[in-house]
Image: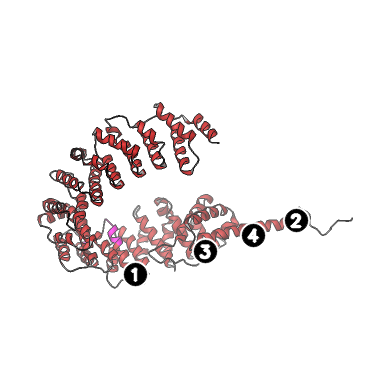
Amino acid sequence: MFGEHPARETRFSPKRQQRQLLQREVNRQESVLGALALLLGAETEETARIRAVRRLARAGMEEANLSLLLRTLSEHPEITAPSWPCEPPQYAYCGRLLYLLSRNLQLPLDTFLFYPSLAQPSGPLLWTAVIEAIMLLPPAIQAGEYEPLLNAALTTPWVTVRYNAAMALANLAEKVRLTAETVRTLQHCQEEMEALPVLVAVSCTLLRMQQECGLEMLMRLLEPDIPEEGRKAAAFVLAMEHSLPMKQEQHKRLTQQLLLALQDSDEEVAQNAAHALRTAGTRETLQQLCSLLSAQQPAHVKRATLAALEEMMRTPALRKMMQREPQVAIVPLLLSETPEVRQQASYTLASIGGSYAAAVLGTMINNADSPAYLDAVEGLRLLHGALRLPWRPRVVRWLLSCLHISEEQVQITALDSLAYIAWQGQVHGQQKALRACSAQIEQDGTLERLLTSASAWVRQRTLELIGLLYCQQPTLHNRLLHCLRHDEDSGVRACAAYVVSQLASRWRTRSPIPDLILALTDTDMYVAQTALNTLALLTSASDPFVVCAFREVAAYGHTSAEENTLIKAARKQLKQWGLSAATIKRAENDLD
């Protein structure tokens, strides 16, 4: 008939349906490949990688997509940029992807390495991603199910795979005991002509397994003929490990090796060697360090030497040795032209403690023209025994005297030192000492004056100190509430709102609740949110005024992004109090 087209396909013809299915499959594959391109791209932003992982985790639930994904990972070349010690970000995100797929599909991780559609052996990217996924599992599962796989990874031909396997075993060795087979595999890696990153990681693992060969290799990697990155890594590992398996002869060799590393041209190596020297606790070592301070050395070597002495002062016997012998090698460094050396010298003197160190720091504080004046003010907070008699009243008095100097930096440093001492009293439960400090500071009357300082930083630091003390003066509390209501700096107002919550149990004047309610209307949203949080801590649903204020905030706030945060916080608190059902519904209707 006229208008008929016999060759034309109908809407539901098999050919048309086949083409549509084929097109959908192509679109699906393109979507997977696009997400993989984002995941594996060198310049991809973190948020884009996270979205790609989520998309691929959903797509990988289908057999065809999973096969395509694993094949792409297996065939992708080894990623070596950025170079060690930095880690290419692609590995961690690929590991997260395989972890999600393993959990969703209920498949062991090693299944992905030997998937039927993959050409064997699997490539380096897939191997490393599986290792990264293993590291996301609980330690018991890692050791029970995947330790043989990690051992096998140590024998693969790719440096990145062997390095990541060694690091996975190093992390695992901190939590569980590894098998003798793992020890033999790691020792075999040390005997081979292995790449530097793998050697460091393998030696770190053996060290954590209390194997002496790990320590021997790390000492070898500290030698000057080793590339800089290797020396840095070896020194870092030794600095981080707290338990080293050593015989007496090894201990002597390690000490000498670390003393040489202390003089390394690289500052990072020297600093890590200083921290590692905390285990070298002998009088001879102390004398060697003091002789280094007296010699002509670069500034970074002197800093590292002082840091080593500070680390060693954690041992009471060594600290007593230093206290008995005047620290004549350290004191001249307080007048060094390098600020970092002066600062570290004050820290080291403070860690030694005793009459001599306290007298030196006190003398520096009494001379505002000294180049080490600020360093001494800062160092006093670390003075050994600063919270105990006879040093506590002297240290507090010296720091209070610094508050009478009009220079902003001096006042802030002194306030920070007083705050640190008070914080130490709280952390260590020295309530009696903290109360004595608080009484001495209150009697001085300086804090109330500093709350009217022209510097917002000084006012805020003063409020932070007040929050750590047992302050009970009504005038000081009134001054605090005045800062909450009228200070021109929003940071000071927010800090005042927070400090009110810290002092609530010691509040003896008029209630701060009305001032906090008024602060809910502050033009700065951070101040209003802090006031709301403080009210939530200090009150309950039984206070009708606070509940009414929260309802007002929840119902009649504005619609900007910041103010919506305040509204949500008020609604959440009302909900916790069990008052939100009708209130939130009414508030949402009003906003609509």
At mark 1, the secondary structure is: helix
Q: Nearer the viewer, residue 19 or 331?
A: 331
Hey, which quadrant is residue 543 in on the image? top left
Res. 14 mark: 2
In the rendered image, residue 349, in percent from the top left (x then y), is placed at 17, 55
Q: Return the residue at label 4.
A: 26
Separation of disc 1 and disc 4 at Cα?
50 Å
In the rendered image, residue 557, in percent from the top left (x then y), is placed at 48, 36
Q: Nearer the viewer, mark 4 or mark 2?
A: 4
Specify the segment rendered in magenta: 236-247
Mark 3 neighbour class, 10 Å CA radius: few under 14, some 14 to 19, many 20 or more: many
Does 239 lie within the magenta span? yes
Q: Nearer the viewer, residue 432 or 512?
A: 512
Separation of disc 2 and disc 3 at Cα?
36 Å
Separation of disc 4 and disc 2 at Cα?
18 Å
Q: Return the residue at label 3.
A: 74
